[in-house]
């Protein structure tokens, strides 16, 4: 019997009414409706068991090759895939939530470069992709299209949201073909593997502990959040808020919609009230605007967490501020195709494939700036595509397949 996974335990997307994966946003995304906001407010986002699980996973040395983090695994429980073993190149059918923001675009480029390698190796014949453009209804139709088409050897799905997509994923499983889910989760364990970085609580713990270590008790932190209702983002703040409260940090949070003007206004208003010692962000979009608000006010830079987006790393280096760049590992876009390769070879894969999620620290900034010197500001430093055939040109030129 198929087991349904409680929403609180799903890694990502429980009420994802908007097209965000954990570390990215699109300023054009529409805010939730009033009803959606009421629903969001009724959800208890803090989950002690999941908090403890992800906290522990931060300290686990992953299994796998040191130079291939996209193949590393944290506490894997392996499942047999012998039933899917077969020879010959296979057709992959990819139902993608969207490529509507820089994080997803970076991953999409990487995924297609990985595809080229597997095509040359005779593993994958083609990957037919349908882009849902951030719509649950569209993605459900896309998955049903693939099912009805009847010529998919493997279904790869990056869900737009969790609950809405679960029945469609289960229908794909019912075809008897392997299903690989990544990035955001669904409420069923029928996929052969679910691939994702550690998660939102790990991000919140990393960032809050950094600020707590750098600041004194009673320090003022402004938390800049994108939008409500996306569980990986809500979990980031739930973890950080818990730790700030316990440490005696005075933290106030605002939703910004990733609007640079709104971010500057929030910081300016808070600076008008008094000192702001730290800035916490649940995604890196808008980090430069936050820093510029301190420059405009002529005050010292805060201790700050952003993300591994190049715009933040460059501003961090230019200003010399005390910072940390948490990561929602973009290299995960390679893993589903490599998982498909393993499945068709009859090799075991983890039922839940947890990838490492290590922040970029001050001592690593120069390294990642050098590695990504000519990349655009919207590029993500830990994209993990340096060994792929189009590196670095396709990422530098932002060649979107």
Image (spheres, rainbow, N blue to C red):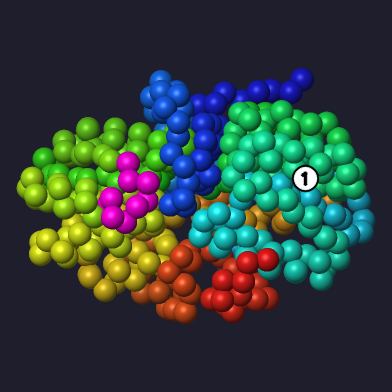
Who is closer to the viewer here, 252 or 144? 144
> Which residue is painted at 46% across and 65% down in the image?
378
> Which residue is painted at 92% across and 59% down in the image?
88
Q: Residues within 10 Å of mark 1 (few under 14, many from 20)?
A: many
Q: Indicate the quadrant where residue 244 lies.
A: top left
> Which residue is painted at 28% across and 55% down in the image?
261
- Which residue is disc 1 drawn over? 155
| Residue 336 is at least partly visible in this image | yes
> Which residue is painted at 16% across and 38% down in the image?
250
Looking at the rendering, the stretch of residues picked out in magenta corresponds to 255-263
Left or right, 332 with reference to 173: left
The residue tagged with tag 1: helix, strand or loop? Answer: strand
Viewport quadrant of the N terminus: top right
Viewport quadrant of the C terminus: bottom right
Q: Indicate the quadrant where residue 364 lies.
A: bottom left
Left or right, 350 with reference to 279: right
Q: Is residue 361 magenta?
A: no
| Residue 71 is at least partly visible in this image | no
Where does the image place residue 295, in percent across and percent down from the top left? 17, 65
Residue located farthest toward the right when viewing the structure as drawn: 87
Who is closer to the viewer here, 26 or 234? 26
Q: Is residue 371 above or below residue 354?
A: below
Q: Is residue 52 above or below residue 211?
A: above
Where does the image place residue 291, in percent across and percent down from the top left? 24, 61
Where does the image place residue 97, in percent across and percent down from the top left? 63, 46
Q: Is residue 257 magenta?
A: yes
Where does the image place residue 69, in percent across and percent down from the top left? 57, 59
């Amino acid at each position: 019997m198929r087991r349904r996974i409680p929403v609180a335990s799903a890694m990502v997307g429980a009420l994802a009414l908007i097209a965000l994966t954990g570390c990215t946003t699109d300023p054009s995304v529409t805010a939730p409706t009033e009803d959606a906001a009421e629903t969001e407010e009724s959800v208890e986002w803090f989950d002690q068991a999941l908090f403890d699980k992800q906290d522990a996973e931060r300290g686990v040395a992953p299994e796998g090759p040191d130079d291939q983090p996209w193949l590393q695994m944290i506490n894997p429980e392996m499942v047999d895939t012998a039933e899917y073993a077969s020879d010959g190149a296979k057709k992959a059918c990819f139902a993608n939530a969207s490529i509507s923001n820089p994080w997803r675009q970076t991953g999409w480029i990487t995924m297609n470069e990985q595809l080229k390698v597997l095509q040359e190796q005779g593993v994958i014949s083609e990957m037919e992709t349908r882009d849902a453009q951030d719509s649950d209804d569209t993605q459900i139709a896309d998955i049903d299209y693939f099912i009805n088409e009847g010529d998919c050897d493997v279904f790869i799905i990056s869900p737009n949201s969790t609950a809405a997509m679960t029945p469609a994923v289960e229908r794909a499983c019912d075809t008897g073909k392997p299903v690989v889910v990544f990035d955001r989760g669904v409420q069923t364990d029928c996929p052969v593997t679910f691939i994702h970085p550690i998660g939102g609580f790990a991000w919140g713990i990393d960032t809050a502990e950094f600020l707590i270590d750098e600041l004194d008790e009673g320090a003022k932190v402004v938390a800049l959040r994108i939008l409500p209702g996306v569980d990986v983002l809500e979990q980031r703040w739930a973890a950080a808020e818990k730790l700030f409260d316990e440490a005696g940090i005075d933290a106030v949070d605002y939703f910004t919609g990733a609007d640079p003007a709104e971010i500057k206004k929030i910081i300016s208003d808070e600076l008008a009230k008094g000192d702001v010692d730290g800035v916490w962000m649940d995604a890196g979009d808008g980090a430069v605007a936050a820093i510029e608000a301190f420059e405009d006010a002529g005050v010292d830079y805060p201790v700050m967490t952003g993300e591994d987006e190049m715009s933040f790393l460059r501003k961090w280096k230019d200003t010399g501020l005390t910072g940390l760049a948490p990561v929602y590992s973009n290299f995960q876009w390679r893993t589903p195709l490599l998982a498909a390769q393993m499945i068709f070879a009859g090799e075991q894969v983890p039922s839940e494939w947890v990838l490492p999620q290590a922040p970029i620290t001050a001592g690593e900034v120069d390294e990642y700036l050098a590695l990504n010197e000519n990349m655009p500001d919207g590029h993500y430093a830990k994209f993990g595509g340096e060994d792929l055939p189009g590196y670095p040109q396709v990422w530098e030129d932002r060649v979107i397949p």
